[in-house]
Image (cartoon, helix red, strand yellow):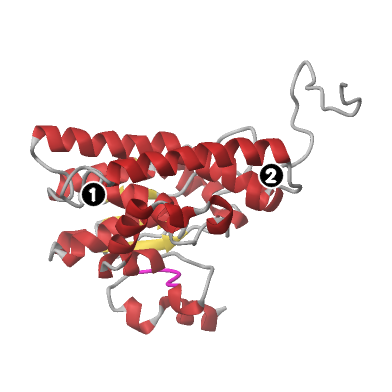
Amino acid sequence: MSDQNAYVPPRIWQWEQPSGGKFASINRPVAGPTHDAVLPVGKHPLQLYSMGTPNGVKVTVMLEELLALGLTGAEYDAWLIRITEGDQFGSGFVEANPNSKIPALMDHATTPPTRVFESCAILLYLAERFGEFLPSDHAVRTETLNWLFWQMGSAPYLGGGFGHFYAYAPEKLEYPIDRFAMEVKRQLDVLDRRLAESRYLGGEEYTIADIANWAWYGQLALGRLYDADEFLQVQQYLNLQRWASEIDARPAVQRGRMVNRTFGEPETQLHERHDARDFETRTQDRLDAAS
């Protein structure tokens, strides 16, 4: 029997009201800036404009890993872009990333400064710039890039698909939750099977493929995304759990996860980072005191 109340799409779609639940304010059908806002520039060549969501975490982990290797040229300023307040639609940010999504990186070591947007493009840029976390062996490099781009194609089903309908949509709908839960479970199985074969995704070496995937799937496996660990039964993926926990224990990962983070326990947050000492002096304490 057909549902008399079923939604029938109009012949021509029109944007009549914001949609998207908790994040409705960041969704609109047009690009470009909504207001003038110049991006701040700090003292380091690398200027990051971001927020501590999984895509932002990828880049701050990468930068902290490079610094942990003693590569002082990877020092950076991390400026907070509050996406729920529309900072990503400021004119300066749109110049850095015309797609108005975090993160965006400006490298002032070049003239003119080089803009890099899309989180995995930033990882690849930094890996090539500093010669780290991207193997030189042709076969291993190719396998690493396979998993880097796998993450780019797969994570939208986790975040914009499952995460949106399970955690943020204004009402719970069985069909999209069931559909995207099935896909996320398949993705977790893909990763688990790969990690049964090797220590890391690209092989035996920790790479940008691990950094990119850990920010999403590692944190999901550790129960940090959408409060969905029980719903998705993430503990059953034993190889994924081993990999996620091993990466989570890395000091650079722990630092990177804090940067531009504005949610969770206060001790996990560092709203802005301009110097390694900020992890001790707590940038957000100064920002809160000044507000």
Coordinates of residue 248 in the picture (x, y in percent): 33, 64
Q: Nearer the viewer, residue 139 or 121?
A: 139
Quadrant in the picture for residue 49:
bottom left
Residue of label 2:
20
Callout 1, which amino acid? Tyr
**Which tag is nearer the camera, tag 2 or tag 1?**
1
Q: Is residue 229 above or below residue 10?
A: below
**10 Å crowding of disc 2: few (<14), some (14-19), many (20+):** some
Estimate how packed mark 1 is, as few (under 14), some (14 to 19) or many (20 or more) residues with alpha carbons within 10 Å. Answer: many
- Magenta-colored span: 269-273
Quadrant of res 65: bottom left
Q: CA distance from mark 2 to mark 1?
A: 35 Å
- Mark 2 lies on a secondary structure that is loop
Residue 159 appears in the figure:
yes
Q: Amino acid at mark 2?
A: Gly
Tag 1 residue? 200
| Residue 216 or residue 13, whichever sits in front | 216
Q: What residue is shown at x 29% (from left), y 41% (from top)?
A: 194
